[in-house]
Image (cartoon, rainbow, N blue to C red):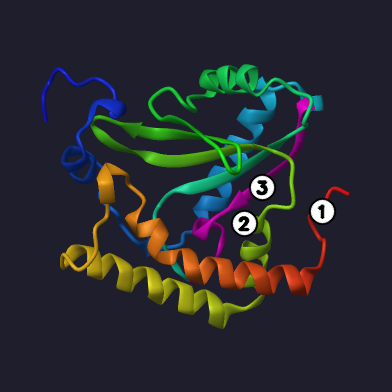
Amino acid sequence: MSSKKQHVSELTPQEFQKTFPIILKDVSPVYADWYQEEKTSIIDVIDHKDIVRINHIGSSAIPNIKAKPVVDILLELDGTCNVDNVVEALKNTGFGTEVSIKKNNPFEYLLAKGMTVKGFDEKVFLLHVRYAGNWDELYFRDYLLDNPDVAAEYSSLKEKILKDISEGKMERMPNGQPNGYSNAKLSFVKDISKKAKEKYQDKYSLA
C-alpha cells in the first residue's frame, strides 16, 4: 500500500480487500454494550427533535450466530431535518471521518467508524442514516431473534459465501465495489424480510 494514501477512499479494490478482510466470528454479548455506548454518543450531538428511532440492526444484534465483528446502527430521522447537518455533527463522534457514502433508493448516508487505511480498529461500526420508515432491517432482525433455526441457516449461508469468495468462486468486489458478499445474501434476506413483515404486520410503521 502506498504511504501517500491517507484516506480509505484512496484504496484500490485490491488494497481495500487486503486492509478490510471479511471475518466471521461468534456474536459477542459485548456488541450490545458497544451499541448502547454509541447510541448515547449519537444522541449527545444531534438535536433530539430530529431523531425518530435508533436501533441495533444486522447480525451483531443476533445471538448464537456468526457475524462480522461490526455493529450496525440504524438512525432514523424526522423528514423535516437537514440530514447534511446531522451527518456533519456525527463527525464529532468519529462517524464518517473516513467512510461516508451517500446512497439513493432508499436515500441513506452510510457512515463508518473504526475503519482507516491501517485497517480495523478494536471497535467497528456502520451507521445507516435514513429518514424514518418501515425498514426491512428491523423486521429481519426480529424474525431471526424469534426463530433461532432461521438465524442458524443465515449464519451457515454467510460461512458458505465467505468460503466461495476465498476459493475464487465468487467476487467480493465486482466492478470494484465491495458488495459481492452482501449481494450473495440478498435473496435470503429479502425472503425472510417479507415473511417477517407478514408476521409482524406494521410493527415499525409510522402511519
Range of residues picked out in magenta: 50-64
Which residue is found at the position 49% from the left and 69% from the top?
Answer: 187
Q: Position of residue 118 (x, y in %)?
A: 23, 31
Q: Position of residue 109 (x, y in %)?
A: 54, 33
Horizontal placement of 68 versus 111: left or right? left
* Quarter location, residue 127: top right
Tell me, for residue 171, which label it has, or none.
none
- Which residue occupies the extreme left position in the image? 2
Callouts 3 and 2 close, C-beta under 8 Å? yes
Q: In the displayed structure, would residue 34 be above or below residue 190? A: above
* Label 2, residues with CA under 10 Å away: few <14, some 14-19, many ≥20: some
Q: CA distance from mark 3 to mark 2?
A: 10 Å
Q: Earlier in the sequence, mark 3 or mark 2?
A: 3
> Does the magenta segment cover residue 35?
no
Q: CA distance from mark 3 to mark 1?
A: 14 Å
Which kind of residue does numbered mark 3 sit on? Asn
* Label 1, residues with CA under 10 Å away: few <14, some 14-19, many ≥20: few
Instruction: Using the rendered image of the protein, determine whether residue 163 is visible from the camera's viewpoint.
Output: yes
Which residue is found at the position 59% from the left and 53% from the top?
Answer: 57
Q: How many marks?
A: 3
Judging from the image, what secondary structure is the residue with disc 2 in? helix
- Which residue occupies the extreme bottom position in the image? 149
List the residue tagged with mark 1: 205
Which quadrant would the N terminus be assigned to in this image? top left
Judging from the image, what secondary structure is the residue with disc 1 in? loop
List the residue tagged with mark 3: 55
Q: Earlier in the sequence, mark 3 or mark 1?
A: 3
List the residue tagged with mark 2: 137
Q: CA distance from mark 2 to mark 1?
A: 13 Å
Q: Position of residue 38 (x, y in %)?
A: 58, 36
